[in-house]
Amino acid sequence: MAFEHVVKLLNETDVVAIVTTRKNGERAATAIWSMVVDGVPYVRSAFGPESWWYRHVVAGRPVSFVDGDGSIAERDRASALDLPRVDVTLVEVASDDAIQPALDAEVERKYAAAEPSSVRAMLTPEALDCTFRVEPAA
């Protein structure tokens, strides 16, 4: 899967499955939300730094996205790991970066039909501190 496909996937899919690696090398799939602004994909931890996928990323462990509807990771994490995926690099975005208001607006637009408390969780200062730009694997 080419990186352009990842951008399309993160733009058009409500829930994506991020695959991170635990300290022991075991892979883990987590369903998360994503945003694309001006053709650039982003992800954010709604649970701030307490999210284990976030901790795996900041520890420098490998990251990829499953090709397809990421809600499978909500139902069956093991099955999500069997699907094709593409490796990516996540780059931290500062909470005061000029892109943050556009990301907030995209969260509100893309997830307007979602549970309001889930949307609010994506807009907290803690979540903004846990924003990443998605780039091709290094």
Image (cartoon, rainbow, N blue to C red):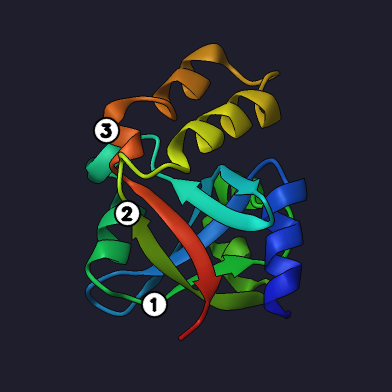
Residue 25 x/y as whole percent: 31, 80
Question: Does dot 2 land on a helix, a strand or a loop?
Answer: helix
Quarter of image, res 50: top left
Q: What residue type is labelled 1?
A: Pro
Q: Do the residues labelled 3 and 2 touch (CB within 8 Å)?
A: no
Would you say 38 lies left or right of 117 here?
right
Query: Which quadrant holds the C terminus?
Result: bottom left
Quarter of image, res 85: bottom right
| Whether residue 118 is situated above or below residue 72 in the rendered picture | above
Residue denoted by label 1 = 62
Residue 93 x/y as whole percent: 36, 53
Q: Which amino acid does label 2 sit on?
A: Tyr
Dot 2: within a 10 Å radius of its alpha carbon, few (fewer than 14), some, or many (20 or more) residues?
some
Q: Which of marks 1 and 3 is in front?
A: 3
Question: Does dot 3 land on a helix, a strand or a loop?
Answer: helix
Residue 44 x/y as whole percent: 43, 44
**Residue appearing at x 59%, y 56% in the figure:** 41
Residue denoted by label 2 = 54
Q: Earlier in the sequence, mark 3 or mark 2?
A: 2
Residues at marks 1 and 3, CA–CA distance in whole angstroms = 23 Å
Q: Do the residues labelled 2 and 1 touch (CB within 8 Å)?
A: no
Q: Nearer the viewer, mark 3 or mark 2?
A: 3
Q: Which of 136 and 87 is in front in this view?
A: 136
**Residue appearing at x 31%, y 39% in the figure:** 96
Residues at marks 3 and 2, CA–CA distance in whole angstroms = 12 Å
| Image disc number at residue 126 | 3
Dot 1: within a 10 Å radius of its alpha carbon, few (fewer than 14), some, or many (20 or more) residues?
some
Residue 127 x/y as whole percent: 34, 35
Dot 3: within a 10 Å radius of its alpha carbon, few (fewer than 14), some, or many (20 or more) residues?
some
Q: What residue type is labelled 3?
A: Glu
Number of callouts: 3
